[in-house]
Image (spheres, rainbow, N blue to C red):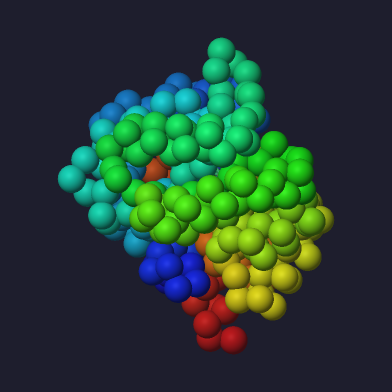
């Protein structure tokens, strides 16, 4: 599978990344159907399959239940083979999300993430916004802290998972990468992608299948990659057949783009 680099950071993102919410959390989620958390054997097989399909990118966060711990255990000895996207700012406990965007919390959260993932670095570290992007990204101390993490080598690239145009653009101006939403039903953030394309910054899309409510995989991937600003799309799945379909759809659309 084709890959994209994040600026000069040396971080490589496969065009399709695997979202891991369903590895660790089945409460308070917006998927069309309930599900049991997969066992270790199923996840080991899913990760091997992802690798065989050329997927190197995994997306996780403290808010995804046991996702970080499980990845730490499952990737033991193989961490270097993967690009891991982590986040801080949102916590999910006792069925409820809470948020903390203080630099001190970010330092603690990153340490805890590295411990859970059994690693000493993250490839991409994102501010997990609650939607008040502008307020969060206006905190110079927080941005300074993110830059410190990068300078220290604890993380290789920094950015934010945002929900607004203003926030997405601000994140791109201050850091390396933004995680945004762009689907046929949600084009509000297009200006963020335009800005990234113009400024040579990187964009990762989340929720490309509208959390499973859109089952037209080919259509969704065609739409996602119709914008030249999009580097990688994270799709969450715990189903091997779906993973295969998603990789085939992305490979197809990227080859068509490269031909045209
Ligand atoms: N604020 C943030 O930073 C943020 C917010 C949301 C999500 N994310 C990240 O983005 C990832 C994706 O978001 P998401 O999980 O909300 O939504 P999504 O990727 O749009 O959709 C995932 C859902 O689609 C289903 N699905 C996947 N492939 C399919 C296929 N080929 N056919 C039919 N159904 C399919 C999955 O079910 P199966 O398991 O049955 O395949 C799952 O229920 C997350 O895992 C997370 O890593 C980040």
Which residue is depicted at the point 74% across and 53% down? 167
Identity of the residue furthest to the left in this view: 77
Q: In this image, 68 relative to 182: left or right?
A: left
Q: In this image, 117 relative to 225: left or right?
A: left
Determine the image quadrant of residue 128. Answer: top right
* Observer-nearest of 139 and 132: 139
Which residue is depicted at the point 55% across and 78% down? 256
- Expressed as whole percent of the image width and height from the top left, the position of residue 201 reads 60, 70
- Expressed as whole percent of the image width and height from the top left, the position of residue 131 reads 74, 40
Q: In this image, 174 relative to 13: left or right?
A: right
One can see residue 99 in this view: yes
Determine the image quadrant of residue 89. Answer: top right
Q: Is residue 179 above or below residue 128?
A: below
- Expressed as whole percent of the image width and height from the top left, the position of residue 119 reads 28, 43
Determine the image quadrant of residue 202. Answer: bottom right
Question: Dividing the image into 4 quarters, which one contains the C terminus?
Answer: bottom right
Q: In this image, 45 relative to 177: left or right?
A: left
Question: Dividing the image into 4 quarters, which one contains the N terminus?
Answer: bottom left
Which residue is depicted at the point 26% across and 49% down? 79
């Amino acid at each position: 599978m084709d890959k994209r680099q994040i600026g000069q950071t040396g971080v490589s993102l496969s065009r399709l990344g695997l979202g891991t919410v369903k590895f660790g959390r089945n409460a308070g989620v917006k998927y069309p159907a309930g599900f049991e958390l997969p066992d270790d054997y199923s996840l080991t097989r899913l990760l091997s399959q992802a690798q065989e399909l050329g997927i190197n990118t995994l997306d996780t966060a403290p808010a995804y239940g046991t996702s970080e711990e499980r990845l730490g255990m499952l990737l033991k000895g193989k961490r270097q083979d993967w690009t891991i996207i982590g986040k801080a700012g949102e916590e999910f406990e006792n069925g409820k999300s809470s948020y903390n965007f203080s630099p001190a919390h970010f330092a603690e959260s990153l340490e805890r993430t590295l411990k859970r993932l059994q690693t000493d670095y993250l490839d991409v570290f994102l501010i997990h916004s609650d939607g008040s992007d502008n307020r969060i990204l206006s905190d110079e101390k927080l941005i300074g802290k993110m830059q410190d993490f990068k300078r220290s080598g604890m993380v290789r690239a920094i950015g934010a998972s945002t929900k607004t145009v203003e926030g997405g653009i601000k994140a791109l101006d201050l850091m390396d990468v933004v995680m945004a939403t762009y689907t046929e039903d949600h084009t509000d953030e297009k200006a963020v992608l335009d800005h990234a394309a113009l400024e040579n910054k990187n964009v990762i899309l989340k929720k490309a299948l509208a959390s499973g409510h859109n089952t037209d995989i080919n259509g969704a991937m065609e739409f996602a990659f119709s914008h030249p600003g999009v580097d990688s799309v994270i799709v969450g799945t715990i189903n091997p057949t779906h993973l295969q379909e998603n990789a085939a759809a992305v490979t197809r659309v990227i080859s068509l783009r490269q031909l045209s």
